[in-house]
Image (cartoon, rainbow, N blue to C red):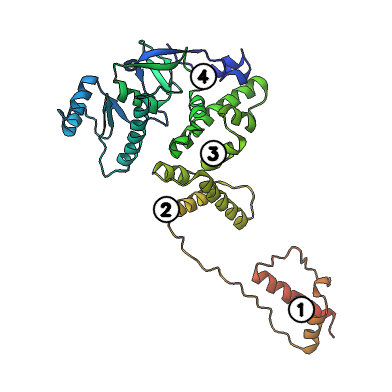
Amino acid sequence: MSVLSLEQKLTAKLNSMDFSKILIEQPYEYKSIFLNRIQPDQSNARFFPAVIIPDQLAYQIATKRLSKAQLIERLDCRNQVVIGKSCILNCFNNSSFEWKKANANIASILELAANLSVSELIQAPSIYPLESNSYQLLTGHRRFFAMIYSNGIDGAAHFKVYNQQPLLPRTKQFQENASREDLPQYGKLQAFQEAILELETLSAMRQRTESKGLTVREIASLLGISMGAFDNYNVLTRYPAVLKAYQKGNSIPFITMKKIVLTEEQRIRKKTGQSILNVEHKRMIDKRIHDILNDIKSPVTAEKKRHYRLGTVESPELMKFILTENILALDCGIDWNLLDWEQPKAVSEAFKHVVDYIKEQKIQ
């Protein structure tokens, strides 16, 4: 069976409903589902490489009947996180950045699992059906892993179950995660980029069917954020250096990072005299942002001084004329408005020309 592309799905929907209802009219119901029927979304910004294990194996690890080395050899789970009932194990190399990042995720999951043990989730994770009577996790990856840790793979939990995969899944994921303060900054920016790609496709399809694309305000509304927040995300995803910094664990607040980006853009505009930044300008800005975030000092190059040489004045009459008369008003054939005053050679040549004119026409 052929799989319809996002463009085909959107075109069909836009022919039958208004675009604003695409994210609203998606039937769902709340159900209790066994966790072993649900699979995480590995392409989601909130996913981290995890191996979910049976309850019996988790018990062996939790009671130290199986060592970490034995587990890695048995499951081939190096550079992954093993998770099961009352068991979560970081199998990354402990000297790597990924190990540190996984530990931060583990701490977050353990904290949520502790809350789950004494109270229910306020917001259930969302899923949608796949073939073979299984489900794909849409939102709530951290909550799902906390459920695994608390209840085991054979346990059941409450989920928001869509009748089918939402038309714009990345946009749905971003809507839920954008307002949460506890999520990593890199995950938010990555989720924004993925959602924007979907909405750009929606805008193109709407352009075809209604002869008008989405406005910036409509895109922000569909993302569930304010125009100010949209501008923040838009600025912070312009340059790879920003995304790489957050991916590597930089924790600079978004507002501070935005100021760095805008300052560098303004600096290049002022330096080049151009309001529209081209590809080369953006490459320079990206390099500069990378250096700032990595505390790399740019080499200081002294600006070349300009020297203006105006020649020799041969007589007192000529000197008096130059100093007392408005030589810019002389009809000597030079358009002073077009003269590039920043170029010493051009200025020197213009002065020589006007001196020759004064000698010939004004001083006998």
144 or 95: nearer the viewer: 144
Q: Position of residue 339 (x, y in %)?
A: 72, 65
Q: CA distance from mark 4 to mark 2?
A: 40 Å
**Mark 4 nearby-residue class (10 Å; few <14, some 14–19, many ≥20):** some
Quadrant including the N terminus: top left
Query: Which residue lies at the image location 77% right of the left edge and 88% below the top edge?
Result: 315
Residue type at mark 1? Val
Q: Nearer the viewer, mark 3 or mark 4?
A: 3
Q: Nearer the viewer, mark 1 or mark 3?
A: 3
Q: Are marks 3 and 4 in contact (CB under 8 Å)?
A: no
118 or 252: nearer the viewer: 118
Query: Which residue lies at the image location 35% right of the left edge and 31% below the top edge?
Result: 109
Question: Could you say whether the residue bearing mark 4 is in a helix, strand or loop?
Answer: loop
Name the residue that disc number 4 marks: 167
Which residue is the extreme one toward the front?
118
Q: Position of residue 297 (x, y in %)?
A: 44, 60
Name the residue that disc number 1 marks: 355
Q: CA distance from mark 3 to mark 2?
A: 21 Å
Question: Could you say whether the residue bearing mark 3 is in a helix, strand or loop?
Answer: helix
Q: CA distance from mark 1 to mark 2?
A: 55 Å
Query: Which residue lies at the image location 18% right of the left edge and 25% below the top edge?
Result: 60
Question: Could you say whether the residue bearing mark 1 is in a helix, strand or loop?
Answer: helix
Query: Is residue 17 found left or right of 135 in the rendered image?
Result: right
Residue type at mark 3? Tyr
Quick check: 248 above or below 301? above
Name the residue that disc number 2 marks: 294
- Which quadrant of the view contains residue 58? top left
Residue 151 at least partly seen:
yes
Query: Is residue 179 found left or right of 153 in the rendered image?
Result: right
Name the residue that disc number 3 marks: 233
Which of pointers 1 and 4 lies earlier in the amino acid sequence?
4
